[in-house]
Image (cartoon, helix red, strand yellow):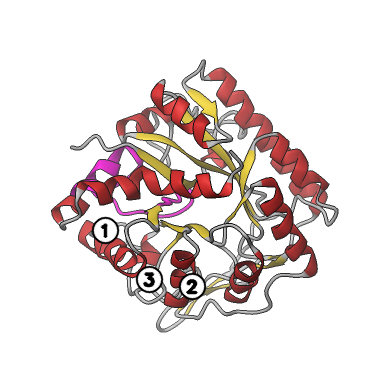
């Protein structure tokens, strides 16, 4: 096993921690459930990551998946009520702050590159707050400023549903990500405000027209925290070559999503997906975008990943497979850590 240090661009662990969810996992204790907790992060040489605050539907959708002869389609999710979403985000923010306090210095909130490096130097795990979908933010954007003051440094304007800022891309395969309208006027104001505050804009769940709207407006590098290549797996959640080129050309980064159904050409939900298939997808992205533009955005606790990785503790298996495929050590370090720190440095005020 190698000891390469890793910063991860996306996880959904907040939804499952005991500080937020009664009966949930104690993030400070090793569990066999899900993908991520602090002991397994340490075993996998994770030194930090973006933790997603996310407002889930008030009522769980039923019978929203349709299997087709060659793929699948998930019924487009409904918009959320702003007050409901804000209650959830407030509760998750409170839970994360409580977890960090409870960790006795083993975890630290990071709002700058210096904070991440300081945590790393002291063997503390760096937590960067991200919000996946801006339903909790009203058109006046006041709550954006509240969240920024509380430490939020990354924001996806939409999840895969509509809101006042734009239109998330529905889940479907095989399908183009060009599924409907892009940003609204409120969405354009949100992008400008994020740029002014130094909040990174995540394009992961935005449809293609919304992507190009952000590209035309934003003064920051383009970033997708967890996505894959549409050329290899034509799901709506994946990015076309033209979108990948735009990220490359703005000095941005794509966080490679470990979701097997966005890696595999057949989009099958198959945890037996071999690591060489995972590595070939990474290789495609690096060949297209360059070694400085591709990082890890695991989507831990939010998806199905290869059983050969299994959870955060298995990340060394991925890096070993990349090494065997011919990736050199500088490229591995960029993918594992350096590329996220570079794009944070270009996006967040110093």
Q: Name the quarter where the C terminus is drawn.
A: top right
Residue 265 in the figure: left or right of residue 193: left
Dot 2 and dot 3 residues touching (CB under 8 Å) = no
The residue that mark 2 highlights is: 243
Dot 1 and dot 3 residues touching (CB under 8 Å) = no
Mark 1, other Cα within 10 Å: few <14 / some 14–19 / many ≥20: few
The residue that mark 3 highlights is: 267
Residue 313 lies in the magenta-colored region: yes
Residue 272: numbered disc: 1
Taking 139 as reference, is 179 above or below it? below
Could you say whether the residue bearing mark 2 is in a helix, strand or loop? helix
Spatial CA span between label 2 and label 1: 29 Å
Question: Does label 1 or label 3 sit earlier along the sequence?
Answer: 3
The residue under the point 71% across, 42% down is 88
Residue 166 lies in the magenta-colored region: no
Q: Name the quarter where the N terminus is drawn.
A: top left
Q: Report x, y in % for residue 21.
A: 61, 35
Q: Report x, y in % for residue 179.
A: 60, 79
Residue 218: numbered disc: none
The residue under the point 56% across, 24% down is 100
Quarter occupied by residue 327:
bottom left
Using the image as rendered, state which of residue 12 and residue 61 is in the foreground. 12
Quarter occupied by residue 257:
bottom left
Highlighted magenta segment, given as a residue range: 296-320
The residue under the point 48% across, 72% down is 243
């Amino acid at each position: 096993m190698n000891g390469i240090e890793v910063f991860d661009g996306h996880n959904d662990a907040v939804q499952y921690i005991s500080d937020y969810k009664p009966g949930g996992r104690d993030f400070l204790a090793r569990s066999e459930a899900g993908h991520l907790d602090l002991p397994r992060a340490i075993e996998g040489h994770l030194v930090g990551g973006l933790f997603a605050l996310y407002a889930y539907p008030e009522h769980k959708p039923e019978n929203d998946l349709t299997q087709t002869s060659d793929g699948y389609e998930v019924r487009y999710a409904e918009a959320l009520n702003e007050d409901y979403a804000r209650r959830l985000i407030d509760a998750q923010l409170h839970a994360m702050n409580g977890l960090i306090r409870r960790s006795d210095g083993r975890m630290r909130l990071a709002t700058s590159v210096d904070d991440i490096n300081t945590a790393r130097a002291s063997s503390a795990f760096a937590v960067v707050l991200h919000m996946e979908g801006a339903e909790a933010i009203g058109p006046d954007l006041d709550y954006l400023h509240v969240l920024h003051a509380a430490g939020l440094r990354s924001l996806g304007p939409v999840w895969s549903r509509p809101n006042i800022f734009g239109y998330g891309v529905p889940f479907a395969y095989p399908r183009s990500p060009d599924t409907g309208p892009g940003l609204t006027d409120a969405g354009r104001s949100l992008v400008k405000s994020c740029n002014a505050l130094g909040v990174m804009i995540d394009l992961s769940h935005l449809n293609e027209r919304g992507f190009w709207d952000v590209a035309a407006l934003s003064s920051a590098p383009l970033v997708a925290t967890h996505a894959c290549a549409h050329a290899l797996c034509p799901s709506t959640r994946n990015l076309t070559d033209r979108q990948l080129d735009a990220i490359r050309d703005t000095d941005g980064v794509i966080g490679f999503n470990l979701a097997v159904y966005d890696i595999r050409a057949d989009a099958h939900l198959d945890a037996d997906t071999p690591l060489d298939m995972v590595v070939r997808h990474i290789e495609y992205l690096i060949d297209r975008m360059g070694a400085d533009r591709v990082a890890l955005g695991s989507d831990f606790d939010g998806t199905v990943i290869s059983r050969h990785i299994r959870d955060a503790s298995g990340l060394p298996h991925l890096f070993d497979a990349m090494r065997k495929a011919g990736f050199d050590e500088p490229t591995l370090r960029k993918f594992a850590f350096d590329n996220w720190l570079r794009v944070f440095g270009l996006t967040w005020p110093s």
